[in-house]
Image (cartoon, coloured by chain):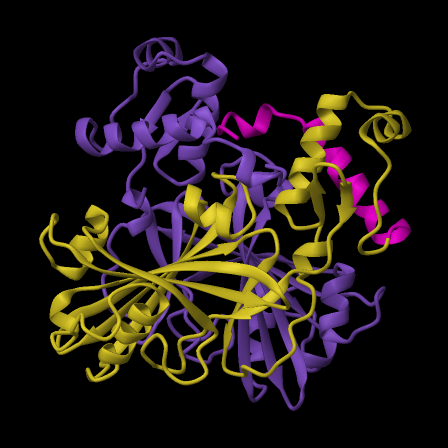
Chain colours: A yellow, B purple
Amino acid sequence: MGTTQLESVAEPKYWHLRTVLTEALDSEFTVGEILPNERELAARFGVARATLRQALEQLELEGRLQRRRGVGTTVAPPRVGVDVGVERQAWPGAGDDAWQPVDCAVAAPPAAVADALDTGRDTPVHIVRRSRVSHGQPVAAELLYVPHSSVPDLTGIDAPSGAARARAVLRELQSLALAGQDRAVELGSARADDAKELDRLPGAPVLVVTTRFFTGGRTAALSVATYRADTCRLTFGASGGVEIHPGPQHQAS
Amino acid sequence: MGTTQLESVAEPKYWHLRTVLTEALDSEFTVGEILPNERELAARFGVARATLRQALEQLELEGRLQRRRGVGTTVAPPRVGVDVGVERQAWPGAGDDAWQPVDCAVAAPPAAVADALDTGRDTPVHIVRRSRVSHGQPVAAELLYVPHSSVPDLTGIDAPSGAARARAVLRELQSLALAGQDRAVELGSARADDAKELDRLPGAPVLVVTTRFFTGGRTAALSVATYRADTCRLTFGASGGVEIHPGPQHQAS
């Protein structure tokens, strides 16, 4: 993946094969169908196994193929559209939130989170873990960082730990006035715990959505949500009810 | 990257090394600094070269490292925040648009685009190519698909081709009433032409932003924008002017 003198580089073999395979997927295969094994595919397209594997990895990255040990390579269904728009300004856990509280801990956050929250680097904060399921599949895992100053009235009596504790933190948060929020999306790799929750291997490509919640001139909470990049497309926009078709990316070669 | 029985898999070696390297980057290295070569790094951390390479690839995916032939591996600057919010509903090319028209062609779009535009699969449309530069670096390439029915008064007299033609299509588009737009983000891989424009190799991971522009109950135009995933974080949100800090992902391990 390193950059190089692009002008002098011919189209790599695996890239040409990827284009040919994409066309074959469009015309000959249906969603869920199992592809012939690597040996047969390499023979059919007259390429080395290593080239074939590179092309398959590429198509997996693009969400066209799924590969599972013991099953083989299957044609992936279109990515699921999951709404992450920011038109509706609301605290996490409010109203028809798509997330399920899983757990809650108190620990020092990563340095960049501490800086964004303007807490000291070693100051513990509440860390609420939530998960998001769509069409029966886990699609995202979230860590929500909440400084003690944002939930000053939280007591430890009713719910000392677990999902109940997570709900208590979310409930307290909602007594603050929400002044605004912003959101950023970037490519990342799944941390070990997120990977397990998402049924991926550590390091699998994920889309990381960072949301900052503002109140009274400061950041009251920060959410880092990790979406499966193979199965999800993140949708934003005016018309939340619009049905999202399979991405043009699926056939845009 | 295939999924497997996660329960029975110990943390892969490269993943552990990635964590160790991340800490070293945070504490010992500064942005732009050149890392020791692979042989020295492998010796220092007591790992095989193959393991080291996997960890370096991971950190490149996460935007922590940049690798260039002839230069070596350097510590990457924080990703640049590029605003792709949809609060401001506007036609492409209107007002303070961040994009530069490059070219314009007439051709049949990919099948999924034709379906979204509800044009026939073999019907040619205007394809406007634009590019987006941020801080002197090309960060994104866009193909904007505009059916003839959206720009019925366009003539070929003044600007038959090139950037001038692209501007003419954008200008005509603005005489339509914009009823709304929506947007989706997903992981993709750079097509050969986009890769060249973005100074990447074909297949490099990119963030694909698809925007549909609606008018009078139909899709008047569709934009497929390809952002470099290594250098960009896409920002959305209420407060367009908020400064985006380096992502928590940068240190969230």
Image position, residue A190 (x, y; %):
45, 45
Q: In this rendered view, identify the residue nearer to me: A37 or A125.
A: A125
Is A217 part of what is drawn in magenta? Answer: no
Q: In this rendered view, identify the residue nearer to me: A95 or A158.
A: A158
Residue B238 versus residue B21 in the image, above or below: below
Q: In this rendered view, identify the residue nearer to me: A22 or B44.
A: B44
Asked where in the image residue B34 lies, by quadrant, the reply is top left
Is A23 part of what is drawn in magenta? Answer: yes
Image position, residue A79 (x, y; %):
65, 60
Residue sitting at 11 percent across and 58 percent down?
Answer: A119
Q: Residue furthest front?
A: A157
Q: Residue furthest left?
A: A120
Residue B87 versus residue A106 in the image, above or below: below
Residue B203 seen in this snapshot: yes
Image position, residue A173 (x, y; %):
23, 77
Q: Is residue A123 left or right of residue A43?
A: left
Q: Which residues are magenta?
A: A1-29
Residue A201 versus residue B34 in the image, above or below: below
Q: Is residue B145 left or right of residue A197?
A: right
Q: In this rendered view, identify the residue nearer to me: B61 or B215.
A: B61
Q: Is residue A116 left or right of residue A67?
A: left
Image position, residue A248 (x, y; %):
68, 61
Residue sitting at 81 percent across and 23 percent down?
Answer: A47
Q: Is residue B90 left or right of residue A79?
A: left
Asked where in the image residue A117 lies, by quadrant, the reply is bottom left
